[in-house]
Each structure stands twice: as structure tokens, then as C-alpha cells.
Amino acid sequence: MRPVAPGAPAPRSSRRHRMAFCGYSVKFSPFEADRLAVGASQYFGIVGNGQQLVLDIDRPGGPRVDDGLLTVCSFYTNDGIYDCAWSEANENILVSATGDGFIKIWDLGRRRAPQEGPAGHGQPVAQLSGHAKEVSSVDWNINLRELLVSASWDSTVRLWNVQRGELMTTCGAHRGVAYAAIWNPARPGVFASVGSDGMVHIFDVQAIGSGGGGTGTGTPVQGFRAHDTEILSVDWNKYNANEIITGSIDHTIRLWDLRALSSSQGSLGATPLHVFTGHNLAVRRVKFHPFHGNVFASTSYDMSVGVWDTSPPSAGMTRRFNHHTEFVIGLDWHLFRENVLCTTAWDRTVVVWNYLTDPPPTQMPMATPGARRPP
């Protein structure tokens, strides 16, 4: 976990920003305290284009906007954007997971002025190709900073060396859609993936091999059935390298200790440390708090956001927020400001707030001119 930026001014209040497209993913910058990326898709991500937004939280003495979030730049894709991730090595590099199977790489340092053309601020500086269907998830390794992992509707999880622009390994362990893959922040070469088969797979870069060109074996070092239905999201506890949470369409979130699971439980199911209930529809995303190992947040198709405590005996939901009016898809915690959350939803809004001190705004901001894809 990175320390709070020295002398960084505190946010003035909660914020709500309206976009032209439906929100799918939000990620706070690991370098700049007031910057976040938003991946969005036209027409609910079913058809249409994608938009990669970069927003700044307005600062004291800086430019002011009515909703508190200033658009730095936006990039467009021919298909929807379902996830995004910041580089851990360069504050200007950002990747987008798109519906056409590509991973687009953007460089904010090379963006052009918007008046130079109608198609946003420029084209990707590179793209990674290999997936045969929609890319649903991307995650950049915080320790091995040249590595990126992606998950796709083509059932595969793929390991990339972004610095070389090379596919290193294809992992085909899931029987169905691979919805998410994420690195373990405490174990540099380890990542987890989840999918529509209800399975959690754990991979280790050293064990799966990386032969280049995708020729690694891609075999998981551990796997177990965590839910009887599709798992949409997974995250690692930043303070316990063996603890993960999973969110499923069965409306539940489950907490797991990998040390308590044996390899023989793969097809038989496993016993979680705790089953969290409180959402009324599918759990779309789960995310552990970067400052507190016993706290995590979740979003759901029931249009709510939950904050949870894993500490027994009172484990359960401690806060519930209903500030969105459509499926809530994207979620992230601020890396520098304790207890600050950001969410985005199909209602085309991005909301930033401190869940303990500032309630999220429910009043829709004035409609702003939305960027449109040129014909």
C-alpha cells in the first residue's frame, strides 16, 4: 500500500459526474492522488462504442467545475470498454479492456488537444491481441511492473509482458466465461481468476511457465468450487496473502482462506470462512479496503453499494448506499485518502465520496455536453 501523499489537500466534498456512456470500471491512479480513470460503454455495453475517460478531482486553487470532477481527456474505441487499469511503472500509461478482444494501451503524455480532431484525444499507442471474445478484466502487477493479466469471455486468462508487447501464457482452466483475474499484492507472481463455472483458480507465474508467444502451460496451482453459480468478481486482502473474497450471481459474497482448502475440493465445493448476504441481485464487484484488512466494499445489480466488516462476531454489512439508479458495475478505493470510494453505473454517473463522513450525492448534476463518437 502506498502512503498518503504528503501535504495533499483533502477533498472538499462528495462528487457526482455525468458521462455520455454507461460506466463499467473506475480506477484511482497509483501516482496522482486526485486522478481516476473511467471505462464506459455506449448502450449498456451491448452494442456501440467505448470511451476511456480520465478525470481529476478539483483541487483548492485549481480549475473548478460544478460537479467537482474535471475531464482531463477521453479516448474512444470501436467497441465497449469493460475494464481499465493504470500502469504501475508510468503515471501516463493506461490500458482498456474492450469488447473486440483487444487491450488498448493509452499514453496521456501523447494525447492531442481536443480541437485537433473530433475523435477524442488520440489513438492507442499500442494494443495487445490474443483474446477471441470480449476482454472482461485487466489488472497490472504492482510488483512485477511489466506484467498484466487479463480475463475474457473466450474462457481464457492471459499473462502479458506489456513492456515487450508479448503474450506470455494462456491459461484455459475455466469452463465458461472468465470474468476476472487479479494479482496478489503480497505475492508478486500469484494471481486469482474466477468465472461462470463457479471456480476460483490460483496461478503462480513461476509454476505456469512463460515460454513467450503464449506457450506457457497455464496450469493453476490451486483450484476450488466457491459458488454453485457464476462468480463475477474476486479480490485479495491487502493484509493477508491467503485471504480472498468472491462475489457471485447467487447474491452472496464469500470469504476464503486458501490455507484451509485442499486441492481435492476442486469439484466438490469448499467451505468459506464466512458467507455475506445483503444484496438482492448479483454481486458485480468486490474490493478490499487498502487501509483496513477487515473492510471491503461491493457493488450489485440491485443498484446498491455495500461496505462490509469481516471481523467476527459482527461480520456483515455496515453501510448501504443507494445513490445509483441502474446496475452498479465499477468500484475502487482511493489509494491515498482513507475511506474514499468511487463507483460508476449504467446510469452514466461517476460518484466519489467518503463513506464514513460524506454521504454520496443523490442529486443528478446538470447535463453536460457528452462527447460523441464521430460518424
Image: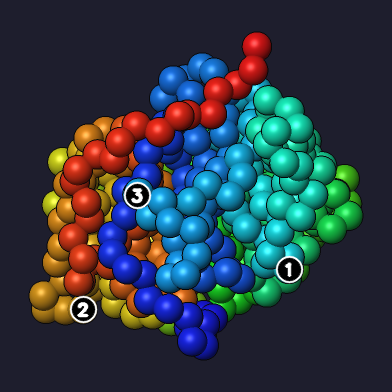
Q: Quadrant of the C terminus?
A: top right
Residue at point 20% right, 71% down?
356
Residue type highlighted by circle 2: Ser
> For mark 3, what is the residue?
67
Q: Amino acid at mark 1?
A: Ala
Q: Neighbour class for label 3 at 10 Å: few (<14), some, many (≥20)?
A: some
Q: Tags 3 and 2 in contact by the CB under 8 Å rule?
A: no
The front one of 41 and 102 is 41
Residue 324: horizontal and vertical position, in percent? 24, 41
Q: Nearer the viewer, residue 175 or 370?
A: 370
Question: In this rendering, does residue 233 appear at all?
Answer: no
Quarter of the view holding residue 44: top left
Element class at badge 1: loop
Q: Is residue 289 left or right of residue 13?
A: right
Which residue was labeled with disc 1?
A: 89
Residue underneath mark 2: 311
Earlier residue among tags 1 and 2: 1
Q: Nearer the viewer, mark 1 or mark 2?
A: 1
- Given this view, does label 3 or label 2 mark the residue nearer the observer? 3
Q: How many marks?
A: 3
Q: Position of residue 24 (x, y in %)?
A: 45, 39
Q: Is residue 236 above or below residue 154?
A: below
**Secondary structure beneath label 3:** loop
Distance (Cα) linking label 1 and label 2: 34 Å
- Mark pair 1, 3: CA separation: 30 Å
CA gap, disc 3 to disc 2? Answer: 36 Å
Amino acid carrying label 3: it is Asp
User: Which residue is painted at 28% across and 64% down in the image?
Assistant: 13
Residue 59 image position (x, y, % from top left): 45, 67
The reply to whether residue 294 is visible in this rendering is: yes
Marks 1,2: beta carbons within 8 A: no
